[in-house]
Amino acid sequence: MTNLPPSAPKSSDNTTLGFDEFIAILVAFVAIGGILLWSFSRRDNSWNFNIVLSPSPSSTSKPQPSPTVNSPASQVQPKANSQLEAVPLPPKNIVPEPSPPSPLILPSVPVTPLNSSPRPKPFSTSRNSDLSIQSSPLPLVTPAEQKSIIPPPIAFNDVPTDFWATRFINALSARGIIKGFPDYTFRPNQPVNRAEFAAILQQAFDTELSKNSVPFKDVSTKYWATPAIDRAVGAGFLKGFPDKNFKPTQNITRVQVLVALVSGLNLKQSAKPSQVLSIYQDAKNIPKYAVDKIAIATANGLVITDSNPQFLAPNQAATRAEVAAMVHQALVKLGRLDKISSENIVRSPGQSSLSTGKLTNELSSQ
């Protein structure tokens, strides 16, 4: 009887793992856990471990290169007798980095500065070029014309309120046409010389300086009234004498004042001189050269007397009060001053009573 070798013992289903197998499994799990931990920690640095394990997918974006880091998995080697194999993870789709959004084109908005009139302008966008805004024109506002403020007249201590020429003097002094003396007097009954009258004309009518001024032998270039004399002569108010003298210090007469105003204002005759001058009882004393001018002055309300209107006293020296009153009437004729009702104004025969309105301006354009 032959002795058979003992049969190999059957492996039991309850056989426990050996020490080496346990170590191999432990090393495998540690390696896999290290790989996963490392891949998760590198995800924030824009590096995907799946790119290494899987073939490079087609993508429109170009991944940014990252520095090469030694994987800790390469340092862990499982044993040869390990029954576990590393299973590669399935590839994941690579999400490309978002590109910066294209700037949105917004319609331009006009900026209107403070306290300025708006200026609407049409605007357009790249998406809709047909978009436009139609603006209606704004109404223009015309500022109201400011009225000139007239200062109060100069209170002269020798011109009482009941003086016949007080209102005429006040109207001119308030506008700076006539002035008084340093002692606050006006001296209304003092005569006026020709140089002083030229200065009053310059202030009242703002005459322009003539380019062709007439040189007078008795008026030097340094004389205080030379500019006023040149302006009065150039504007046609005054003239010199045949001997080429002006006689600036000579007192001017009433007839000379009236002739100067009529000549400078270029007033025209509207009636026969003899008919107009019949009002004066001393009409025969009027110089022949001044007959027509005095008739025109009377018809236009320029003649003012301090006493009886029937006496002109043409050759009498004109006082400061009389000159102020006559210049005032000339400015009324031009429409620059309001008319003053006074019994001292001479009215020609047939002329209507004096009203409180303005006189009709018959002055032709200069």
Image (tube, rainbow, N blue to C red):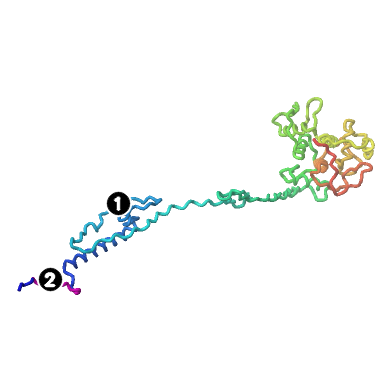
Q: Look at label 2 and name its amino acid.
A: Ala
Residue 149 in view: no
Residue 74 location (% of width, % of height): 23, 56
Q: Look at label 1 and name its amino acid.
A: Pro
Give the residue number, with chain letter if any, for mark 1. Answer: 67
- Labels in figure, total: 2
Residue 133 in view: yes
Quadrant that contains the C terminus: top right
Residue 148 among magenta residues: no
**Which span is picked out in magenta?**
5-14
The residues bearing labels 2 and 1 have C-alpha atoms spaced at a distance of: 57 Å
Label 2, secondary structure: give it.
loop
Give the residue number, with chain letter if any, for mark 2. Answer: 8
Horizontally, residue 66 falls left or right of residue 7, namely right
Q: Nearer the viewer, mark 2 or mark 1?
A: 2
Q: Is residue 276 above or below residue 68?
A: above
Residue 33 location (% of width, % of height): 27, 63
Horizontally, residue 279 falls left or right of residue 172, namely right
Q: Return the residue nearer the eye: 204 or 280.
A: 204
Q: Quadrant of residue 87?
A: bottom left
Farthest residue to the left: give it: 1
Q: Return the residue nearer the eye: 159 or 206.
A: 206
Q: Return the residue nearer the eye: 170 or 20.
A: 20
Quadrant that contains the N terminus: bottom left
